[in-house]
């Protein structure tokens, strides 16, 4: 096996977080050693609901991932190598050299597709050192008790040490554009509102994740020049309502570890099958996304999330794990909707994905 990475280290500049229940129990044995931070609860804040929820929560830094990969894989990781072209059984590098293999997996991130109707979760995060301890007992994964802007907006805070925090300004928006200056000013303002005095900024990260409203997953896979196996966002292997791909990367890794036929065709079929199966299993979450983005006014989207976080803790955990039961779905959809009923009905029953031209 050889892993090609165009940057100087794998993993970029990111923090991946996940609930313990998001990944299969058998996978935690090999995944949790990657986690640098582990908590046993997390908090959410809304104008009319503030709550601490039970359940393990974990974070992995790109630095930790790179260190473990270096230890385990050694020179099988080739960094600073750009890829110009990919075929099912070969790659052409930027220097023009061509390498052949039994199979190739393309994990270079999302690429635009006319077959997926998407919106965006986008964020800028600062890892900061404070002048004094912050006193947070655990993460605040959503603080939406703030001014709403550019869609549904909240702050996400992870306490790494008594004085070191990750603070992210996150927005569920119709467009992918980010202004680092604007987001940075908002992060500084939020820290000040919490009584946190920033001594220095250690790191800045940003990201844009896809949120799917609908589409045609088979056409998404068919619309390729060659049947190349894919992983991660490039394979649409992410939670439709959050854009998070780590739990599905874990599941794909477990499946590939059991793979016996490593021909290009067999590996392509495995990744495609997993992607299509996930799409078919998660249609309910795309319905909820349509209610969020199409039925609610942008500055009122927080009301849908506030209502959701008032529900049973087990229901919330199953939602993030992509395993909502029929009872869960009925509970989420019943009651007075926090949006206009006519628009909610239109978003669910009259939605049509954009035509492919």
Image (cartoon, rainbow, N blue to C red):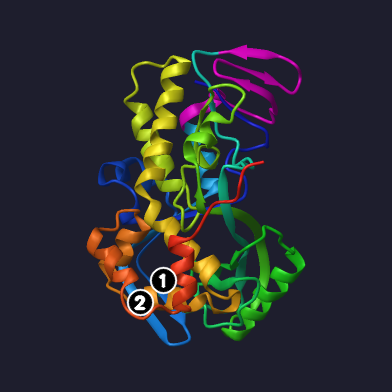
Callout 2 environment at 10 Å: few (<14), some (14 to 19), or many (20+)? some
Q: Please say if 257 is above or below 302.
A: above
x then y, percent, for residue 227 = 53, 22
Q: Please say if 6 is above or below 279.
A: above
Q: Which residue is mark 1?
A: 138
Q: Residue furthest left?
A: 327
x then y, percent, for residue 64 = 51, 46
**First-in-chain label (2 vs 1):** 2
Residue at 41 percent across and 57 percent down: it is 285
Q: Is residue 50 left or right of residue 26?
A: right
Q: Which residue is mark 2?
A: 52
Q: Residue furthest bottom?
A: 48
Q: Secondary structure at mark 1?
A: loop
Q: Secondary structure at mark 2?
A: strand
Residue at 67 percent across and 41 percent down: it is 357
Q: On the image, which quarter does residue 344 sit in?
A: bottom left
* Residue 17 disc label: none
Q: Which stretch appears magenta?
A: 72-100
Q: Is residue 194 magenta?
A: no
Q: Nearer the viewer, residue 250 or 78?
A: 250
x then y, percent, for residue 123 = 62, 62
Q: Please say if 330 is above or below 338.
A: above
Q: Please say if 236 is above or below 262.
A: below
Residues at marks 2 and 1, CA–CA distance in whole angstroms:
9 Å
Q: Is residue 243 visible?
A: yes
Mark 2–mark 1 CB contact (< 8 Å): yes
Callout 1 environment at 10 Å: few (<14), some (14 to 19), or many (20+)? some
Q: Is residue 94 left or right of residue 67?
A: right
Q: Nearer the viewer, residue 242 or 166?
A: 242
Q: On the image, which quarter does residue 312 sit in?
A: bottom left
């Amino acid at each position: 096996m050889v892993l090609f990475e165009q940057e100087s280290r794998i993993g970029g500049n990111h923090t991946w977080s996940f609930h313990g229940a998001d990944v299969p129990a058998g996978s935690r044995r090999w995944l949790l050693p990657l986690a640098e931070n582990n908590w046993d609860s997390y908090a959410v804040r809304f104008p009319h609901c503030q709550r601490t929820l039970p359940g393990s929560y974990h974070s992995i830094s790109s630095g930790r991932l790179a260190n473990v990969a270096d230890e385990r894989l050694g020179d099988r990781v080739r960094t600073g190598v750009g890829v110009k072209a990919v075929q099912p059984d070969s790659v052409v590098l930027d220097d023009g050299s061509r390498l052949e293999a039994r199979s190739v997996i393309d994990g270079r991130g999302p690429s635009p597709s006319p077959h997926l109707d998407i919106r965006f979760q986008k964020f800028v995060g600062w890892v900061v050192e404070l002048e004094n301890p912050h006193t947070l007992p655990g993460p605040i994964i959503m603080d939406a008790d703030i001014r709403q802007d550019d869609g549904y907006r909240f702050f996400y805070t992870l306490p790494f040490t008594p004085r070191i925090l990750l603070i992210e300004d996150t927005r569920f928006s119709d467009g992918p554009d980010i202004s680092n200056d604007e987001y940075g000013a908002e992060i500084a303002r939020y820290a000040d509102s919490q009584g946190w005095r920033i001594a220095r900024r250690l790191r800045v990260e940003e990201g844009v994740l896809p949120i799917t409203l609908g589409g045609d997953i088979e056409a998404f896979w068919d619309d390729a020049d060659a049947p190349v196996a894919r992983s991660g966002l490039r394979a649409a292997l992410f939670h439709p309502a959050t854009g998070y791909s780590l739990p599905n990367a874990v599941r794909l890794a477990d499946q590939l570890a059991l793979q016996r036929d490593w021909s290009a065709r067999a590996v392509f079929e495995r990744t495609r099958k997993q992607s299509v199966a996930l799409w078919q299993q998660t249609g309910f979450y795309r319905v909820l996304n349509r209610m969020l983005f199409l039925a609610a006014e942008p500055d009122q989207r927080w009301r849908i999330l506030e209502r959701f976080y008032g529900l049973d803790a087990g229901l919330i955990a199953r939602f993030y794990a992509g395993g909502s039961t029929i009872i869960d779905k009925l509970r989420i959809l019943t009651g007075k909707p926090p949006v206009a009923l006519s628009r909610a009905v239109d978003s669910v029953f009259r939605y049509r994905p954009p035509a492919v031209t």
